Image (spheres, rainbow, N blue to C red):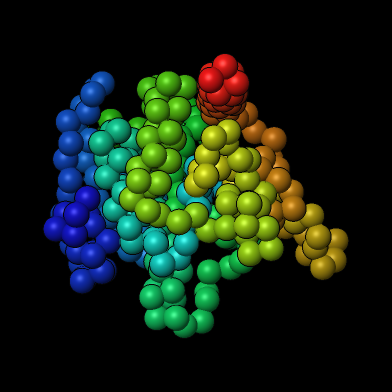
C-alpha cells in the first residue's frame, strides 16, 4: 500500500479515531470480504466483523479459549512501513479475523521519547490472528441470532478454520517474509543476541526472520505473590509458546516449513559442492 490508501499508516495517522470507511474485496471461496480499522488500546487493528466477534468471544471466556497468533518482529521505527506491507498482503490473501500493530512503539520511536513498548514484547510488534474453533462457539458465537440478515458475517464455526489450510498459511507466511524483506523492514533483534530476531517465548518458524507462532490463551499465574492471589494471566515468556497446551492449528505448517527449509539447505550444499568441483577441475 502507498500512503494514499485509505488504510495506510499515514492516512490513518492524520485522523486516528476518524471513520476510514470500509474496504470490500471479493473473496476467492465464498463471499465479499469486508474490512475496517480500529485505533484503540495501543494498537491499530484491521479486521472483519467476524474478527470483532471472535475477540468478544475470547473476552467472554476470560481469554482461556485458543488465542493463536503469528507475530512479526519489526524495529519500532519500521512499524508504519511494515503495517503497509503486511496489511496489503493480509487483504490480498483474503484473510479473515484480523491483524494489528502497536502504535505506541511506533510513536515513541518517532519522537525518540520514553519507550512504552515492553522489552518482554520485543518481536510482537505486528500480529496476525488465526481462528481456532472452540466448543464455546458451538451455537455460532456470542452474536448468533442477534443480527437480522447478517448472521453469516458474525458466525463462529469450524468451517472458518478449515477454509484456511496448511497451503494457505505456508504461502501467507513465506509471502509476508519476502515482502517485508524486499521493503527493507528490519526485524527487532535481541539487544543481547543479535542473531535472535523473533520474540522470546514464541515458536520460531524455519526459514523465517520476522514470523513466529504463539498461543496467548491465559494461564494460571506461575509466580503469584501469594497462593491466595493466584489468578489467570497473560502467559509470560518463561512458560513458552503454548502454555495452555491447546491444539496447534498450524502444526502441519510448522512441519512443512521445516521440510522446505531443509530441502533448500540441501540444494545450496549440492550447488556449493558442484561449484567447488568445477573450480578443482579448472
Residue 166 pos. (x, y %):
47, 22
The structure residue drawn at horizontal position 37% and vertical position 53%, both measured from the top left corner, is: 184
Q: Is residue 193 visible?
A: yes
Viewer-proximal residue, 72 or 277? 277
x and y percentages locating residue 201 in the rendered image: 67, 49
Identify the residue at horizontal 28%, vertical 33% (top origin): 94
Q: Is residue 271 left or right of residue 169?
A: right
Residue 209 x/y as whole percent: 52, 44
Q: Quadrant of residue 222?
A: bottom right
Residue 82: quadrant of the picture: bottom left
Query: Quarter-wise, where is residue 39 in the image?
Result: bottom left
**Residue closest to the eye, 139 or 128:** 128
| Vertical order, 194 against 216 (above or below) | below
Q: Does 12 sit above or below residue 62?
A: below
- The foreground one among 140 and 254 is 254
Which residue, as the protein is rendered here, is positioned at the far right? Answer: 227
- Answer with left or right where residue 18 lies relative to residue 204: left
Could you tell me residue 177's position as x and y percent?
43, 41
On the picture, is 218 further left or further right than 26? right
Number of numbered markers: 0
Q: Is 5 positioned to the left or the right of 63 in the image?
A: left
> What residue is drawn where x is 50% and y is 30%?
133
- Residue sitting nearer the eye, 88 or 219: 88
Residue shown at 18% from the left, 36% from the top: 25
Q: Is residue 259 visible?
A: no
Vertical relation: 265 (above or below) 84 = above
Amino acid at each position: 500500500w502507498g500512503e494514499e490508501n485509505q488504510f495506510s499508516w499515514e492516512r490513518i495517522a492524520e485522523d486516528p479515531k476518524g471513520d476510514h470507511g470500509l474496504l470490500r474485496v471479493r473473496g476467492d471461496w465464498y463471499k465479499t470480504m469486508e474490512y475496517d480499522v480500529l485505533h484503540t488500546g495501543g494498537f491499530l487493528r484491521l479486521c472483519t466483523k467476524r474478527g470483532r466477534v471472535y475477540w468478544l468471544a475470547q473476552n467472554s471466556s476470560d481469554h482461556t479459549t485458543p488465542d493463536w497468533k503469528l507475530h512479526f518482529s519489526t524495529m519500532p521505527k519500521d512499524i508504519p512501513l511494515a503495517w503497509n506491507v503486511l496489511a496489503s498482503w493480509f487483504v490480498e490473501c483474503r484473510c479473515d479475523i484480523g491483524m494489528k500493530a502497536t502504535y505506541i512503539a511506533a510513536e515513541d520511536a518517532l519522537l525518540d521519547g520514553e519507550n512504552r513498548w515492553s522489552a518482554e514484547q520485543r518481536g510482537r510488534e505486528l500480529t496476525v490472528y488465526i481462528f481456532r474453533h472452540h466448543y464455546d462457539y458451538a451455537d455460532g458465537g456470542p452474536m448468533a441470532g442477534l443480527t437480522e440478515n447478517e448472521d453469516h458475517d458474525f458466525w463462529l464455526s469450524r468451517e472458518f478454520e478449515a477454509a484456511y489450510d496448511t497451503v494457505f498459511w505456508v504461502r501467507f507466511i513465506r509471502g509476508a517474509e519476502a515482502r517485508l524483506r524486499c521493503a527493507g523492514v528490519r526485524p527487532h533483534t535481541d539487544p543481547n543476541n543479535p542473531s535472535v530476531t523473533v520474540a522470546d517465548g514464541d515458536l520460531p518458524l524455519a526459514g523465517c526472520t520476522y514470523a513466529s507462532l504463539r498461543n496467548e490463551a491465559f494461564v494460571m499465574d506461575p509466580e503469584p505473590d501469594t497462593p491466595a492471589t493466584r489468578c489467570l494471566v497473560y502467559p509470560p515468556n518463561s512458560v513458552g509458546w503454548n502454555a495452555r497446551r491447546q491444539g496447534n492449528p498450524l502444526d502441519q505448517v510448522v512441519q512443512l516449513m521445516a521440510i522446505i527449509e531443509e530441502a533448500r539447505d540441501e540444494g545450496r550444499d549440492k550447488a556449493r559442492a558442484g561449484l567447488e568441483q568445477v573450480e578443482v577441475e579448472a
